[in-house]
Amino acid sequence: MTADPPWALLAELTHRCPLRCGYCSNPVELAGRSAELTADEWAGVFRQAADLGVVQTHLSGGEPLLRRELPDIVAAAERSGLYTQLVTSGVGLGERRLGELVEAGLHSVQLSVQHADSDTSDRIAGARSFAAKERAARLIRAAGLPFGLNIVLHRANIDALDDLIALGAAWGADRVELAHTQFQGWALRNRATLLPTRDQVDRARTTLTRWRERPDPVPELIWVTPDYIDGVAKPCMGGWGALSLTVAPDGTVLPCPAAAALPGLDPPNVRDRQLSWIWRESRAFNAYRGDSWMRGPCRSCALAATDHGGCRCQAYALTGDATRTDPACRLSPDHALVRDLVDSARPPAGNPVHPYREGAP
Ligand code: FES
């Protein structure tokens, strides 16, 4: 089928990261440093992406600040006319480094935090990092950049939602994204300890409503639906090969960050192929594009026009078949798989530490 142009590029500059979060949804097998695209290769990717219609790029990882030439990479994206957002843990974002990035043309920053309590945040991250994040937030604010705070929610921090939103307000974030853990990659291994209970999510929703009803200005609050709990499939990536593409650190091009786990996809690489061919012609990008691959109940469901059958990677992770309806959807014949997992979730006890992420080679 004909593909409309993409508008966003997720540029995973490295899989290396100073944090070791157990909820990391990056693949279990990470790309090593020696396989990473060079700054020049990234410049070529940005040019091709802009030609294809992309207007913004998220510079992500791992931790993109670990790329010494990050200012050159930002400048290359800027030269191609792309809006750039740095997605960072904040570790390594000092005054000089941020100044270099702003000078190179950086447009906005999304900072992550694991908890409002510094010790708990460090424990979840598996590294001392809260103080660096606090400092990074101050610097981003002082630089006048649009500032988003990203918080991945799970059993060990969702009960602190009130404090987390207050932290976002205190740090001066323009928006706070409350994103429930995506059970892909490393996080899938830790699902049993990460999955919150229904009661926890209900309480969090009440807290969210209270904040949204406050008359005084608060950050914009983005609630990314907990699909396991709600029984509603998420319109993952806005549809397969519909809006965005991901370039992994080694140049592999994927319709979503987790798609490398799907069998038979044969994802292409920017070192071998032009991005325009990859987007329009490759098997990987056409595998689940549109609706011709769908089976029942999606085929005859009005929701399929908006949820696109849910997440392909999740369908595969739960059923072993990426063409099935996402089991998160309560209409899926496999929904009991998800319901049983949610029913067996237990409230947090003590100070659980999820098995920490192993680092990139
Ligand atoms: Fe791959 Fe949803 S994470 S399609």
Image (cartoon, rainbow, N blue to C red):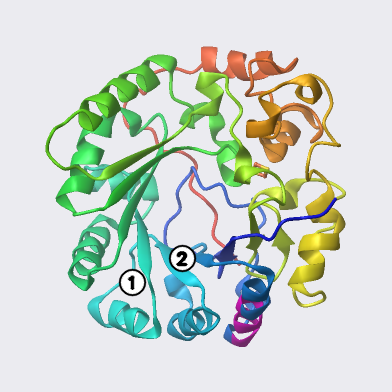
Residue 141 point in image, percent of width and height = 21, 64
- Secondary structure of the residue carrying numbered label 2: loop
State left or right for residue 273 relative to residue 31.
right
- Secondary structure of the residue carrying numbered label 1: loop
Which residue shows up at 30% across the image and 59% down it?
A: 147
State left or right for residue 163 relative to residue 245.
left
Tag shown at residue 227: none
Report the magenta residues as a range.
Answer: 40-46
Magenta stretch prevailing secondary structure:
helix
Instruction: Tell me the CA gap for discs 1 and 2.
Output: 9 Å
22 inside magenta stretch: no
User: Mark 2: which amino acid?
Assistant: Glu
Which residue shows up at 66% across the image and 49% down it?
A: 258
Residue underneath mark 2:
63
Q: Residues within 10 Å of mark 1 (few under 14, many from 20)?
A: some
Residue 29 point in image, percent of width and height = 67, 56
The answer to whether residue 195 is above or below residue 258 is: above
Q: Residues within 10 Å of mark 2 (few under 14, many from 20)?
A: many
Who is closer to the viewer here, 332 or 239? 239
Residue 162 point in image, percent of width and height = 22, 32
Which residue shows up at 25% across the image and 67% down it?
A: 140
Q: Is residue 122 visible?
A: yes
